[in-house]
Image (cartoon, grey):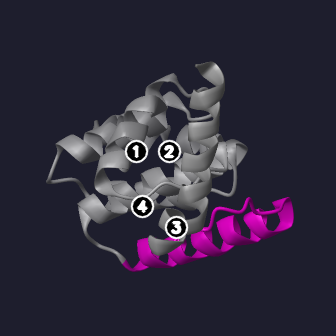
Amino acid sequence: GTKDADELLDQFISHLEDSCLTLVGIPFSILDKKAEKKLLTSRRQGLIGRLEKSSQQDEILRICVILIYQQTKSLMISGKTMTALVMKLFEQEKKIPTRVTEVLLDLKRDNGVSPELLHLVKQFGTAKNSKALAAISETSASLLQKQL
């Protein structure tokens, strides 16, 4: 019955907590807000460091998507598949200006983009917040029109 299913589910979750999650390096305990913010900030700084050093278009795109998503949702993502899925969500996200999404999609499609466009995308990735991201996209409108 329902009680048996609930008990089995509780036992399964308990087994996951005790055995599986620690094996793959995922702590099960929930971080407190201070520790979570510290982790997000540390990860952001590491990603920005990688972004600033990178000259590879696909890596720049991936890191920028990760940074923008983390900045707008306060959630961490990683991996090419997850980044591609998140990028599809950018079109519906109100905190991300349409111009930013257009430039990122253009960067994904085109292999021969200008160094100026790559620099602009890096600026998008390093924006401190949604307002800064919007300001960068607004001031870059003339560059975007030339590139798109």
Task: Report the residue marked by disc 2.
Answer: 140
Q: Nearer the viewer, residue 146 or 64?
A: 64
Identity of the residue furthest to the top in this view: 1
Residue 126, x across and y down, in percent: 57, 62
Badge 3 element: helix
Of residues 51 and 132, the one nearer the viewer is: 51
Residue on which disc 1 sits? 143
Q: Which residues are magenta?
A: 25-53
**Horizontal relation, residue 56 to residue 43: left or right:** left
Q: Amino acid at mark 1?
A: Leu
Q: Residue at x 37, y 47 (%)?
A: 82
Residues marked 2 and 1 touching at CB (< 8 Å):
yes
Check disc 4 and report its element: helix, strand or loop: helix
Name the image quarter holding the C terminus: top left
Question: What's the CA distance linking mark 4 and mark 1?
Answer: 22 Å
According to the image, label 3 marks what residue?
19
Residue 58 showing in the rendered view: yes
Q: Mark 2 Cα within 10 Å, few/some/many (few <14, many 20+)?
A: some
13 relative to 23 in the view: left or right:
right
Magenta-drawn stretch contains 30:
yes
Tag nearer the camera, 3 or 1 = 3
Q: Amino acid at mark 2?
A: Ser
Q: Which residue is mark 4?
A: 63
Identified at 66% across, 26% down, the residue is 3
Amino acid on which disc 4 is placed: Ile
